[in-house]
Image (cartoon, helix red, strand yellow):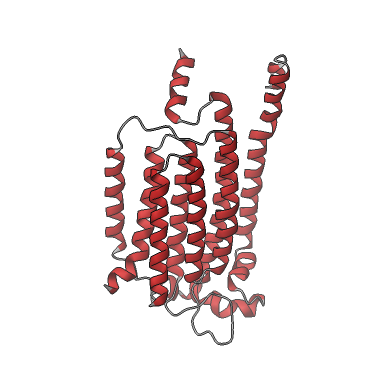
Amino acid sequence: MSFVASMYNYWIVIVLMMAGLYILITRHNLVKKMIGLSIFQTSIFYLYISMGKVAGGTAPILIDEAVQYSNPLPHVLILTAIVVGVATTAVGLALIVRIHESYGSIEEDEIRVQEAEDAQ
Amino acid sequence: MTEQIVIVTLLTFLVISVVGIIVLRNLLAAVILLGLYSLVAAGAFVVMDAVDVAFTEAAVGAGISTILLLGALSYTTHVQKPQKHNNYAALLFVTVTGALLIYGSLDLPGYGSATSPVQAHPEVGRRFIDESILETGVPNIVTSVLASYRGYDTLGETAVVFTAGIAVLSLLGRRRRLTRDEHSNSTDEEDLV
């Protein structure tokens, strides 16, 4: 039981990651793909933060009483990753808006059909 | 123990909202669920002592990225078309990959372990906690690492955000004017492109 409790975080991370990957592979809607990418990213954040946690520790802000702090380094790395992640989401969505203007659709298979017709 | 229960509950909420996102074909509902997902994740980050990450996730993940997605939906469409073919191959692929990852995770140090390499490494883990106050004078260790020890990294991050801003403006700004011109008079399209 305690083994399951200590591994639960990692397993949830893996489930979330695979759910994001599943959306990316199967959904043809481009906005849905961006949502899947966000879920995938957040699961990685979760993995890092879980690794930084120390049982009985507190947030890494120095106070007099604290005896144990959680590791601050994963927090710093993930702060950067969150901001970079939203920047890539913004670029992806801008591309989707442009694709919608050109093709009138954000469904990948419909776009592919139009491409094939244009090529003929 | 209470902390463990809170974390397990929040993580289970995350999985439920992701299942909702997979099933829903209404994109507006999926985007709002993604905002909820980010907010629950921010709550879980607070329980795991990452307060700085929690408020960044709440502001940027739940706030800005939801607004960006809603903005994109307002220019495109709200409904995802039904899938024409089955997805069993993809389901098999993610199940097998997930099973392999879970098998790999069995060797990881347990959650909250104080002796794991992440915590015990003298240069990257302990050093910031023990010496950052002497070297930078900032009580918040995350701030001192972000702005001082990894200052160039943060500068690089700023460059990435700036580049993304330029990319979005060049994709959308010019095109908007072009489509408006096309509607008013259809001439001169070659010049504008």
Q: Position of residue B53 (x, y in %)?
A: 55, 64
Quick check: A55 left or right of B166? Answer: left
Q: Position of residue A86 (x, y in %)?
A: 57, 49
**Residue A74 appearing in the image:** no
Q: Kindly identify the residue that appears in the image at 65 percent across and 75 percent down.
A: B138
Q: Is residue A10 above or below residue B193?
A: below
Q: Position of residue A43 (x, y in %)?
A: 43, 56
**Residue B133 appearing in the image:** yes
Which residue ends up furthest to the top in the rendered image? A120
Q: Is residue A20 above or below residue B5?
A: above
Quick check: B31 left or right of B179? Answer: left
Location of the C terminus of chain A (image quadrant): top left
Quick check: A60 left or right of A40? Answer: right
Q: Kindly identify the residue that appears in the image at 29 percent across and 68 percent down.
A: A4
Q: Quadrant of residue A83?
A: bottom right
Q: Kindly identify the residue that appears in the image at 27 percent across and 59 percent down.
A: B103
Q: Kindly identify the residue that appears in the image at 36 percent across and 62 percent down.
A: A10
Q: Position of residue B179 (x, y in %)?
A: 67, 24
Q: Nearer the viewer, residue B125 or B189?
A: B189
